[in-house]
Image (cartoon, rainbow, N blue to C red):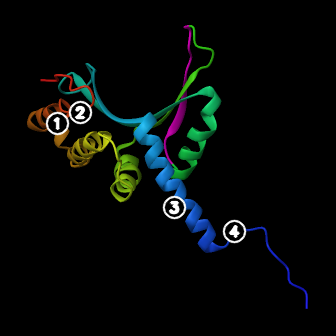
Amino acid sequence: MVIIQSNKATGADNQQERLKFAYWTTGFTDGEGCFSVAVINNKTTKFGKQIFPEFVVTQGEKSLSALKKINKFFGCGNIFVNKRYDNHNENLYRYCVRSLQELDSKIIPFFEKYPLQTYKQNDFLIFKKVIKVMIQKEHLTKSGRNKILKLISKMNRKKKRI
């Protein structure tokens, strides 16, 4: 009798690795990520301002592979380089998801299932509300825009937006 062993992980092993990576991704985001909603001047929009949500994880060039793994894991977003011209020896890289549909269908469900453990969880909950308002196209009205501005004034550094 000949027993042939495969080098491929079994379904259970693969599922276990994916679960470990999910928790790792949450922890990594707690340390190196953010949920932000910028308000950008844009004269081509109805109110002269554009609401710009994004999920971002940042790393130095030496840890770019971690961002590539996160990008592959989520199957969405892009990695951008921020060239450094100061006394740092490596460029910064940003994994960003900006698509409303991808934020709503991939990023938000993931962090609902694998919650953040730091204060970023509060930012995530606000971010989730902003995305919901935008998916429902309420941000195209004055009251919806004001609702978002009020919500995001409670995020991150608590910048006054109104």
Across and down, in percent, residue 8 comes to 74, 68
Residue 41 position (above or below residue 139)? above
Mark 2 and mark 1: span between their CA atoms? Answer: 7 Å
Residue 76 position (above or below residue 84)? below
Categorize mark 3 by other alpha carbons within 10 Å: few (<14), some (14-19), many (20+). Answer: few
Check contact, mark 2 vs mark 1: CB within 8 A.
yes
Residue under numbered circle 1: 151
Check contact, mark 3 vs mark 4: CB within 8 A.
no
Categorize mark 4 by other alpha carbons within 10 Å: few (<14), some (14-19), many (20+). Answer: few
| Left or right of 144 in this view: 38 | right
Categorize mark 1 by other alpha carbons within 10 Å: few (<14), some (14-19), many (20+). Answer: some
Across and down, in percent, residue 64 comes to 61, 34
* Residue located at (40% from left, 48% from top): 102
Q: How many marks?
A: 4
The three-letter amino acid code for the residue at tag 2 is: Met
- Bounds of the magenta segment: 76-86
Q: Which quarter of the rendering shows the C terminus?
A: top left
The tag on residue 155 is: 2
Check contact, mark 3 vs mark 2: CB within 8 A.
no
Mark 3 and mark 4: span between their CA atoms? Answer: 14 Å
The tag on residue 9 is: 4
Across and down, in percent, residue 114 comes to 39, 56
Mark 3 and mark 2: span between their CA atoms? Answer: 29 Å
* Residue located at (16% from left, 31% from top): 149
Q: Earlier in the sequence, mark 4 or mark 1?
A: 4
> Which corner quadrant of the image does residue 156 belong to?
top left
In this view, the mark in front (2 or 1)? 2
Q: Which residue reaches farthest bottom?
A: 1
Check contact, mark 4 vs mark 1: CB within 8 A.
no
Q: Earlier in the sequence, mark 3 or mark 2?
A: 3
